[in-house]
Image (tube, grey):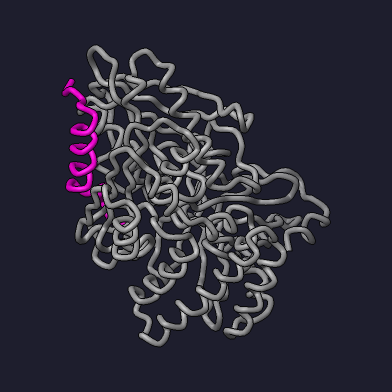
Amino acid sequence: MIEAMAMAEAPAQATIADLAGRWEGVIRVGEASIPIVIRVAQAPDGFVAMMDSPTQNARDIPVTGLSESSGVVRFTAPAVGGRFEGARSADGSTWTGTLAQGGGSLPLILTRAAPAADVAVSAPPSRPQTPVPPLPYASEDVTFANTGAGITLAGTLTVPAGAGPFPAVVLLTGSGAQDRDETIFNHKPFAVWADALTRRGVAVLRFDDRGVGGSGGGTASETSEDFAGDAAAAMAFLRTRPEIDPAGIGFVGHSEGGMTGPLAVSKGAPAAFIVMIAGQAVSGADIITEQAARLAQAGGASPDQVAEARRVQGEVMAAVVRNKNDGPAAAREAEAVLVAAGQPAAQAQAGVRLLSSPWYRWFASHDPAPALAELRVPLLALYGGKDLQVPADQNAEALARVQPAAEVVVLPGLNHLMQHATTGLPNEYGSNTETLAPEAISTVVDWVVRTTGARQP
């Protein structure tokens, strides 16, 4: 669809004022129609935009990167892993394109339903744990090079007060293009982790993912293996800083970042320790299959529907893994599975576009067990008992088998973000004012301090 739209005559370049307003559309999943609302309001420094999915009771999902270039409107919704790309009509009243999320993409036509003057965008929700200056430590914006990839990455280095050298942590984000704070639903968990660790005598480097903020890269061909190279480059940078103890630097990774840290070590990064926060210990295919079933179950699906979700997702993942080196073949086989399961052909074709991407094929095929088994440094793995995205029972048990020396902690009642949760469903992430549960913070920070011998500033 995007290729066909690119052939249309491009309208004049739009401004934020042209994009402001209330935009409404519908995506169709099977027989269900799911309304999507985008609210864009002008602000002194540009715009404020939110996405709503009323029937899913999901509101005020932050929209970032809204822009128009050569007649194509683009935006992302990082909190739900969504991104939109579509052609803007000549009169500016519609955006015709696709909304990609998770493992696929679906057609979406957004029509202006109200002018900017009638759009209400609520103030950002309260996030009381986000650190607010003045802070009792130094904070510096830094850049460093991944020379092998030919890119520069940008981040923030926080250093405890007093005389060093200090032990240090490199924070590694989860899947999707994340900023240095791993911002999601206005939560900034990496800012909270950095604050908690730095106050206890541990320096922290957190950085923008490729193609985000001040970091270069961001091409469609990049995989987690490339991100492991970025992790190694971050560690190499810290080893050049005089205030950092070069023998006391470790990785703390969330979700996919919990996998890229051990992968970087297996390729030679000299980490002194590793912390996996909701990090996978089984293949991406197994994670995604179980995730589909758990989300369906928590969302109220019947046992038969849960079993069907697991079966179909498992067959789709098997098709991707069989064709890990051939994107078009992966798309064809996965599409055939979805059509056989009852999806309309057009919907199935749209849904497999992301599945055939290099990142997805690599992630689905990768087994983290060998890198985990090779680790010879202290390892803490933290899981939430209500995590539906990286289930604790699936991954904690697998990790204990391949790396018996690891310290594995499961905290009951916490979701994938390490918040206290009721269901564990992603729609609770934004409504929760808690960014990180206190017991999650103390578990990680106390372990890092004990492992490194960090001194209280």
Is residue 259 highlighted in magenta?
Answer: no
Q: Is residue 439 above or below residue 333?
A: above
Residue in the picture at 61% in, 60% down? 354
Q: Residue 263 location in percent, x, y?
A: 46, 43
For the C terminus, the image quarter is top left
Q: Is residue 320 above or below residue 163?
A: below
Q: Nearer the viewer, residue 400 or 185?
A: 400
Residue in the picture at 18% in, 42% down? 442
Is residue 435 highlighted in magenta?
Answer: yes
For the N terminus, the image quarter is bottom right
Q: Nearer the viewer, residue 314 or 44?
A: 314
Q: Which residues are magenta?
A: 430-457
Q: Residue 180 location in percent, x, y?
A: 43, 36
Q: Residue 414 location in percent, x, y?
A: 24, 58
**Could you tell whether 366 is left or right of 19 in the image?**
left
Residue in the picture at 47% in, 34% down? 268
Residue reaching furthest to the bottom: 304
